[in-house]
Amino acid sequence: MQHGAIARMQHFSMEVSDTDKSIEFYRKVLGFKLTERHQAYEVAKIPVELTFMRLGNSHHELVLVHNPKKTYRKRPTKPEDDLDGPPSFHHFALECDTRTDWLKVVKSIKEHSVQIVRGPVVHSGYVPSGDGSWGENEAIYILDPDGHRVEIFWALAKIGSDGIHINYKGEKVPGTKTEEL
């Protein structure tokens, strides 16, 4: 059932093995700011450490969760090598407003010697430089200290009222049609 009451996705919460290392990564490489940090059981029913981070003026867009009693193991860096265990997320994405901003982040990634697992790549079957995939955006994929895959992109296609995808230039993308409007 589509009710339209949910306006947007607002934050992402993920488990990390070393909170300090993750805070440093998200601050230095991707420009997040620390809002607040809480210890396990600071609130009786919350048995994990919670760290709230933000990009703008919302309280948080990213929550780092750490269980101080858990033994963590390294996760595979390639999805095709992740053959055992419970379901997890493939990646989460951070959007830049302009290509100039995106290139600044790409530069920061390279300056901090962060592992790039894909890209830079143009997700498109429409433009000649595209990789044949979907979204009409330019992206790069990296791994954080725990091996979580993070996509940084700009120029994601919009959906027109007729269901045809529209790229950042305002052009309709031939051969596209959204399944649900």
Image (cartoon, rainbow, N blue to C red):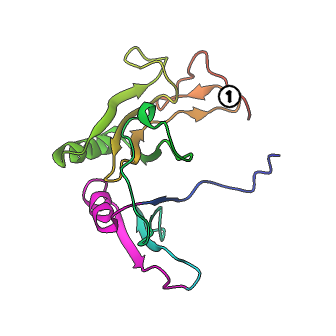
Query: Is residue 92 placed above or below 48 in the rendered structure?
Result: above
Q: Is residue 103 above or below residue 12?
A: above
Q: Residue at x 32, y 35 (%)?
A: 117
In percent of width and height, residue 42 lies at 48, 85
Taking depth in this image into account, of 109 and 161 the one nearest to the observer is 109
In this view, 85 is above or below 159: below
Residue drawn at x 36%, y 47% is 147
- Please identify the quadrant where the C terminus is shown: top right
Residue 25 part of the magenta segment: yes
Residue 112: x and y, percent? Answer: 19, 49
Residues packed near mark 1 inside 10 Å, few (<14), some (14 to 19) or many (20 plus): few
Residue type, numbered disc 1: Thr
Q: Tell me the magenta residue range.
A: 16-43
What x and y, as percent, mark residue 88? 53, 47
Residue 3 sits inside the magenta stretch = no
Q: Can residue 96 be seen in this view?
A: no
Residue under circle 1?
A: 178
* Left or right, residue 107 beside residue 152: left
Which is nearer the eye, 74 or 46? 74
Q: What element carries label 1?
A: loop
Where on the picture, by quarter, is residue 93? top left
